[in-house]
Image (tube, helix red, strand yellow):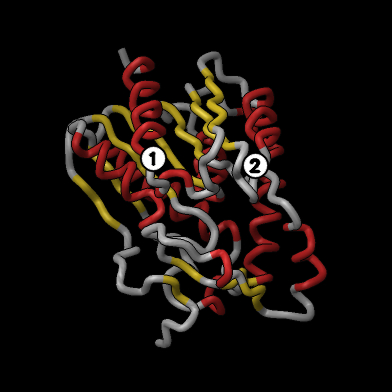
Amino acid sequence: MSNQYIVKPYLDGSSFHFPGNKTGFVLVHGFTATTTEIRPLAERLHLEGYTVSAPLLPGHDTHPDDLNRVRWQDWYKTVRQAYLEMRETCDQVWLGGESMGALLCLLVASGFPEVSGLLLFSPALKVRKLNAALLAQFFIKYLDKSKKSNDQLWKGYNVYPMRGAVQLLKLQKQVKKNLHKVTQPTLVVVSENDQTVRVSTGKSIINSISSREKKLIVLKNASHTMLLDKDNQQTIDQAIEFVQQTTL
């Protein structure tokens, strides 16, 4: 299959599993992305001794047409299954995600109160200009985003599949309806420099969930894919510190 729509096709964006101790993390990538997006966090968590898994979401790392054919429920089922499998071997299971991945973590956590905690990076509960996909889906298959490509080790599509974007809108609605059911310790990290998700979205999530332990970190210069930024280790350090303080 042609890779003309995939940025950095030489990178490994497939599902992976790193065995470790009895505390597990399921990490989830964002819309049009692959597991390269959360790999730096996964590798660091594994270095700390934790078990880590990262599923590749349906419709990703193949062809944009596939992302136009899936429903948000397909993404949700994949993350839920990854959580249930991790629970079989781990005593504690955290969920972590970037962008759309963060939304899927929130939705799973809302239905499984035994989830140990959440790490949410650039959570895409509201995305600038995404509503345009509702009309655009009837006229174009994809919206080009190749000009947004940079030197990050990010693998994914260089277009936004429009029908897939509509499914992201539907996922957002589902998550909003269930935010009050989230009771787990939650870390939300957003950035003033994010051109996709506003800081106010992070504040809205913090205010809407029912968790007693919750923390919002606002970065100055991080990009939307903050886990791949050159100074990402500081962000990852803060996430691990939150986990360790919460699990004491």
**Quadrant location, the C terminus:** top left
Query: What's the residue at 79%, 63% (across, down)?
Result: 132
As drawn, the residue found furthest toward the bottom would be: 1
Label 2: few (<14), some or many (≥20) within 10 Å? Answer: some
Q: Reply above or below: 171 against 3.
A: above
Q: Is residue 144 visible?
A: yes
Q: Amino acid at mark 1?
A: Asn
Q: Nearer the viewer, residue 233 or 48?
A: 233
From the viewer's perspective, tell me whether residue 220 is left or right of residue 142: left
Q: Position of residue 225 (x, y in %)?
A: 49, 49
Q: Give the x, y percent position of residue 86.
A: 30, 42
Residue in the foreground of this view, choosing between 18 and 183: 18
Which amino acid type is marked by label 2? Val
Q: Secondary structure at mark 1?
A: helix
Q: Which residue in the structure is indicated by mark 2?
A: 175
Please report the residue visible at 66 percent of the width from the left and 35 percent of the height from the top.
199
Residue positioned most to the right: 135
* Residue at which label 1 appears: 232
Where's residue 66, x and y in %?
Answer: 53, 76
Can you see residue 108? no
57 with respect to 89 (left or right): right
Name the spot of residue 87 as percent of width and height, x first.
31, 37
- How would you rate the neighbour count of disc 1 (Cα within 10 Å): few for under 14, some for 14-19, many for 20 or more? some
- Residue 163, above or below 154: below
Identified at 75% across, 57% down, the residue is 129
Q: Which mark is residue 243?
A: none
